[in-house]
Image (cartoon, rainbow, N blue to C red):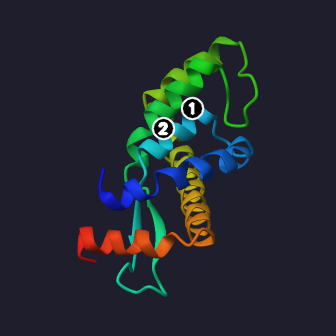
Amino acid sequence: MSEWQDLIVGARMAVDQAFTDRVQASEFTNQEWGLIMTATELDIERADDPEAARLVADTEAIESILPELEQVRSQRGQVAGGGEASNDSSGVVDSIKSALGLDDDDDAVDQAKVAAAESLAQEYAEKLQQHLESNDEFERVRRAYTDKTGS
């Protein structure tokens, strides 16, 4: 972990706790959110400009974890809305086909999940930046980022 990321560990823990309600209101479970954040990297955009610098979620790898998200859902017996999945055999088969990427409308569903995950991750980054700014820590983090990356 780089120095600038070390500086935000405590802030991330505080924002994680405050963001729990937002995650619970989303289509993702806490376990799914954990996977999303594992695939998300935080960066500072325009770090060389103190006035325009902004914490952003690099969500490029989220698409690669969609099979894992589906696996978590099928293991928990839940659907996107958080309700119980039906017990009929076609629901089980559809879940397995979806997890393997074999269902017919997989592209539309996947893109919706990717968009929802990206949006939630960016919302998290914005909350984290707000937290850092409210504690007068963002400038120090921004400087550490520019020192490390040269940006």
What residue is shown at x 58% (from left), y 72% (from top)?
133
**Residue at (73% x, 37% y) in the render:** 81
Residue 39, percent from left and from top: 41, 45
The answer to whether residue 78 is above or below residue 138 is above
Residue 109 lies, in percent from the top left, at 56, 44
- Identify whether 46 is placed above or below 7: below
Q: Up-down: is 126 above or below 6?
A: below
Q: Nearer the viewer, residue 151 or 95?
A: 151
Q: Secondary structure at mark 2?
A: helix
- Label 2, on which residue? 35
In this orientation, which residue lies closer to the viewer: 74 or 129? 129
Residue at 57% of width from left, 22% of height from top?
74
Q: Residue at position x 52%, y 51% from top?
A: 10
Q: Tell me, for residue 31, which label it has, or none.
A: 1
Contact, CB < 8 Å: mark 2 with mark 1? yes
Depicted 45 relative to depicted 131: above or below = below
Q: Residues within 10 Å of mark 1 (few under 14, many from 20)?
A: few
In the image, 145 versus 140, the foreground residue is: 140
Q: Quadrant of the C terminus?
A: bottom left
**Residue 48 in view, yes or no:** yes
In the image, taking residue 150 as reference, residue 69 lies left or right, namely right
